[in-house]
Image (tube, coloured by chain):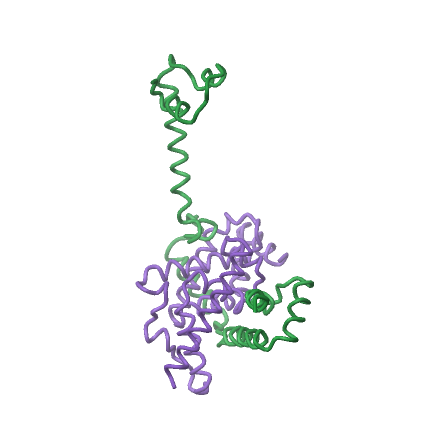
Amino acid sequence: MEEDSSYIIQFLSGEEAGFEALVRKYQDKVLNIVYSFIRHDAESEDIVQEVFLKVYRSLESFKGRSAFPTWLYRITVNTVYDFLRKRRGFLRGQLTEESVYPGSGPRESLLEKEKERTVSRALAAVPFKFRAAVVLKDIEGLSYAEISEVLRCGIGTVESRIFRARQMLKREILKISGESK
Amino acid sequence: MKECSRVKRLLSRYADGESGDAEAFRLRRHLDICPSCREELAGLVKIKETISCGEKKTLPADYLLCRLRDRIARTGGRKREWCWSGAGDFSLRFIPVPVTAIALSFLLLVASFGRSPDTYSLEDYVLSGSRTNTAAVLVLMLGQEG
């Protein structure tokens, strides 16, 4: 946390190195959050770039009322939301074949590939606000309190969204495994 | 049965390690004797693991920084961008509507008082001890004497 503050101060005092350190530190975390929504390598990278560009241009307005990662994840979720909103049907799932079945490395086992596809399809069927809560919990490991700050809602709401998201995921996974039998 | 439906709602929180000590203790006691809730918890943990153990992506070192430097150079340096502390916050999208409505109402109120200085003011009306029902106050606020 103190490390982040020192990078921010460094950047605000005119040294780009502060921003570069923040990018190096958080790029993979942001990428994994974005990827869990988008499931497409190239588009995820574009969105990550967009996120850090927004950070670069609005870091001056960061007041430090929340921790830097909380602020960064809020920008990430909102950027993903905007991206998905522009694409018809994406907010409530209905991903394209390309997105649902991402290109994977040749060494990846068939089982893993199958699991990845199932998770992608199941997650795609969960509405955005529920998906956001469960992704921040299960991918990024944030606490309910942190998620409530990122999504700007109460802890009770976070809890209920995660609960409902998991119910939906369970239903979808059962449905998908039923289809494949 | 009733206990089970209550417990099942709390299991997601328990699986996330977000239950308080007392609640966790009560849940563990129930789980010890209830196979159905144990099964529910196992399912939740499985879903959690499936999502969290998914493929972890990494970017090559400095790949993103190169792209960013290039983009910043093309689009200009540190110009400030309008940002709802997170640019386009979906949870705050609708805040401007009520804020604008309140501001407009306030302006209307001020304008109506300013336009008819000779009319009986709201303050006079209240101080006179007359019955302050909502309709009468609204009429005065809008500057329409009855």
As rendered, which of A6 and B83 lies closer to the eye?
A: B83
Q: Is residue B91 above or below residue A92?
A: above
Q: Residue furthest left?
A: A88
Q: Residue A34 occupies which quadrant of the picture?
A: bottom left
Q: Is residue B137 above or below residue B49?
A: above
Q: Which residue is farthest front?
A: B1
Q: Residue at x 38, y 79 (%)?
A: A103
Residue A102 location, quadrant? bottom left
| Residue positioned 51% across, 64% down in the render | A162
In the rendered image, which quarter contains the C terminus of chain B? top left
In the rendered structure, the colour chosen for chain A is purple
Residue A173 percent across, percent down from the top left: 43, 76
Residue nearer the viewer, A63 or A116 = A116
Residue A107 seen from this side: no
Where's residue B92, x and y in %?
A: 43, 49
Taking A135 as reference, is B23 left or right? right
**Residue A135 or residue A160, whichever sits in front:** A160
Q: Position of residue B57 (x, y in %)?
A: 48, 73
Q: Is residue B137 visible?
A: yes
Q: Position of residue A2 (x, y in %)?
A: 63, 56
User: What number of labels is visible?
Assistant: 0
Chain identifier matching the green colour in the rendered picture = B
Q: Quadrant of the N terminus of chain B?
A: bottom right
Q: Residue furthest top?
A: B118
